[in-house]
Image (cartoon, rainbow, N blue to C red):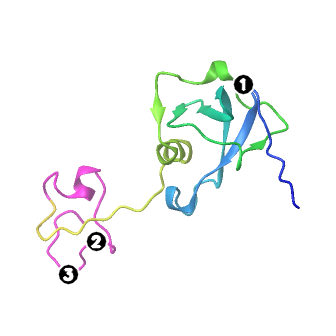
Amino acid sequence: MLQVIIPTFNINDCITIPVPKVDRGPLDPARIIAVIVEKKNELYRIGTEHGLIKGWLSSGNMQRTTSHFISANQVDKQNELTLRETVKIISGGQGFLSCTCKSACQTKRCACFKSSIKCNSRCHNSLNCLNK
């Protein structure tokens, strides 16, 4: 019978956690560096320098790092973020943005206009857009 050894971590251990493909863009990191902030019943509260990651995680996908990149004291405990929001802050959020407007893209209803970027070829390419 195969026995799986589940790693255990302590508070202030520096780790990396994987980021699912649906939560990251093509240029975003596959793993992020974090630190264990709390431990309860073999579940861990994880934090980065940008804030705490929402929820409690198990140790199944965590990997211990050889160096201490961040300590628990450096975590912004007032700010609670999802994993997707954390990756966006770390990488700069190079995701794709497009709109599917049926008008001239001059109001805040247009996702591109609201983000102060120009409409592109992924948006509506056949309409008279004033935001190109």
Looking at numbered disc 2 in the image, what kind of residue is underneath it?
Cys
Quadrant of the rendering where the N terminus is positioned: bottom right
Residue 3 falls in image quadrant: bottom right
Q: Specify few, some or many for label 1: CA neighbours under 10 Å numbering under 14, 14-19, or 20 or more.
A: some
Corner quadrant of residue 66? top right
Determine the CA span between mark 2 and mark 1: 47 Å
Q: Secondary structure at mark 1?
A: loop
The Cα atoms of the two marked residues, 1 and 3, are separated by 56 Å
Q: Nearer the viewer, residue 113 or 49?
A: 49
Residue farthest to the front? 1
Q: Residues within 10 Å of mark 3 (few under 14, many from 20)?
A: few
- Residue on which disc 3 sits: 126
| Residue contact at pointers 1 and 3, CB within 8 angstroms | no
Q: Main SS type for the magenta part? A: loop
Residue 111, by quadrant, is bottom left
Apparent side of residue 11 relative to residue 48 in the rendered image (left or right): right
| Extent of the magenta region | 106-132
The numbered mark at residue 11 is 1
- In the drawing, does residue 109 fall left or right of residue 47? left
Q: Amino acid at mark 3?
A: Ser
Report, in whole angstroms, how far the alpha carbon at label 3 lies from the one at label 2: 9 Å
The residue carrying mark 2 is 123
